[in-house]
Image (cartoon, helix red, strand yellow):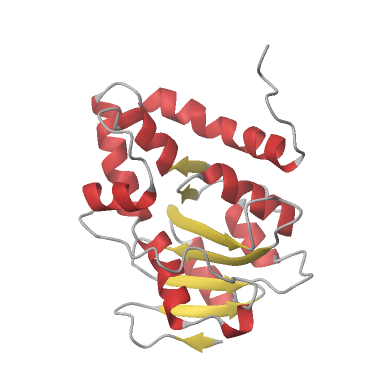
Amino acid sequence: MAEIPSEPHAFVVLDGDLNAEWSERFAASTALAVDTEAMGLIHGRDRLCLVQICDDKDQVACIRIALGQSEAPRLKALMEAATIEKVFHFARFDVAALATGLGIRVNPIFCTKVGSRLARTYTPRHGLKDLVMELVGVELDKQAQSSDWGRVDELTDVQLAYAANDARYLLPARRQLEVMLRREGRWELAQSCFQCIPVMSDLDRFRFVNTFEH
């Protein structure tokens, strides 16, 4: 376990799963920001390497997933807890990655990318960097986005900082999106979309494409 002392709030890197302390910390939350890093974008070929979680106190845990690892019991319990909303950006990918890699069925879900597409109809720019810049006022550094996440025992400080920041600003962005969605009368529609994400993720996992086309 390695602490990152340069961060202003609690930040920890854990191997394989949450420990008891961090599991208890996060279990007290009503919402958690979650992100994942993988070797690529194809489920089943490109393995899950890192899971990042952040709460509303800016406490971040990065969980390194070992080659061949297939379960993380404490992480699974947290991600499947019905009383905790899990907030992702492009949840469709992360939910599928967690199901494929660790057998986790995430629920309930808020996706800031879906929320952005429904609320920010005045722009075509729905990537995390643009979303966080507008709604939170923070410019994310995405230089480490395409890097080797499989070297989990040797991740650089730059990689860990990138991974943490991709989760760190999701909860503030989610709060702003809820305000916009309610204002525009699209909150219920957004909730219906979020409930569809596990199904979409399963279709991606099992390579069903164009399922709903004529």
- 16 or 162: which is nearer to us? 162
Q: Quadrant of the N terminus?
A: bottom right
Q: Position of residue 103 (x, y in %)?
A: 74, 54
Question: Is 35 left or right of 72, judged from the image as shown?
Answer: left
Q: Position of residue 133 (x, y in %)?
A: 25, 52
The answer to whether any part of residue 106 appears in the image is: no
- 39 or 33: which is nearer to us? 39
Q: Position of residue 53 (x, y in %)?
A: 48, 64
Q: Residue at x 47, y 63 (%)?
A: 145
Q: Residue furthest left?
A: 137
Q: Quadrant of the C terminus?
A: top right
Q: Residue furthest top?
A: 214
Residue 58 picture quarter: bottom left
Is residue 28 depicted above or below 19 in this figure?
A: above
Q: Position of residue 213 (x, y in %)?
A: 66, 16
Q: How many marks?
A: 0
The answer to whether any part of residue 23 appears in the image is: yes
Is residue 198 depicted above or below 189 in this figure?
A: below
Q: Residue at x 33, y 80 (%)?
A: 7
Q: Residue at x 42, y 78 (%)?
A: 158
